[in-house]
Image (tube, grey):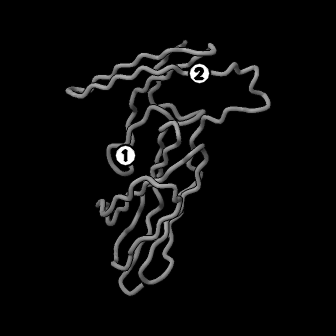
Amino acid sequence: MNLKTISAQVRPRPRGWMFPKMEEKKPFTTVELEFTGITETCNTEFRLENFKYQSLKQIETVDKLNCENNPIVDSLEIKRVLIKKIDNKSIEVSCDAIGEGIKYAFYIYKNDSLIQKVPYSINSKLIFNGDAPGDYKVRVYVRDKSNNQTARNSKVLIIKTGE
């Protein structure tokens, strides 16, 4: 078993970042474990101030030499987030992402203020009320079956009076 820490990694896939506010990212240290045997036992304990989390899991790994015909896809990636006005009252946001068992959550912002949170579901599209003038953007969070998470912002959609 190999253990390493990652901070502010961009490639091969983004890891080691936190997003305290919209459009703001900061490096954040994460821990990565690599298992090389057939089975491993992983004992973890995390402490965050008064919060304590413990876990004991037996993790089965597959020999990489036997995976040529069935490659393991362990990446989660958002390809694009689109936002558009679909009629006088509605705005649609859609997300294209790759990963296994992915779910989507949406945070809707108007004039840089959070106005609505939509919890995780399997829906990659969201239609919401956008009849009032303002600058709208949406932050889409994507989570896979292993609880890996990533996020991306839409572009800003400007709604003017009378549109």
For image coordinates 45% across by 73% down, the residue present is 91
Query: Which quarter of the image is occupied by the C terminus?
Result: bottom left
Percent x, y of residue 108: 37, 62
Is 31 in front, or is 47?
Answer: 47
Percent x, y of residue 106: 42, 57
Q: Which quadrant of the figure has residue 20?
A: top left
Residue assigned mark 2: 60
Residue assigned mark 1: 24
Q: Which quadrant of the figure has residue 60?
A: top right
Asked which secondary structure carries label 2, the reply is strand
Is 154 in front, or is 31?
Answer: 31
Percent x, y of residue 58: 51, 19
Query: Which quarter of the image is occupied by the N terminus?
Result: top right
**Residue sitting farthest toward the left:** 50
For image coordinates 38% across by 38% down, the residue present is 18
Q: Residues within 10 Å of mark 1 (few under 14, many from 20)?
A: few
9 displayed left or right of 116: right
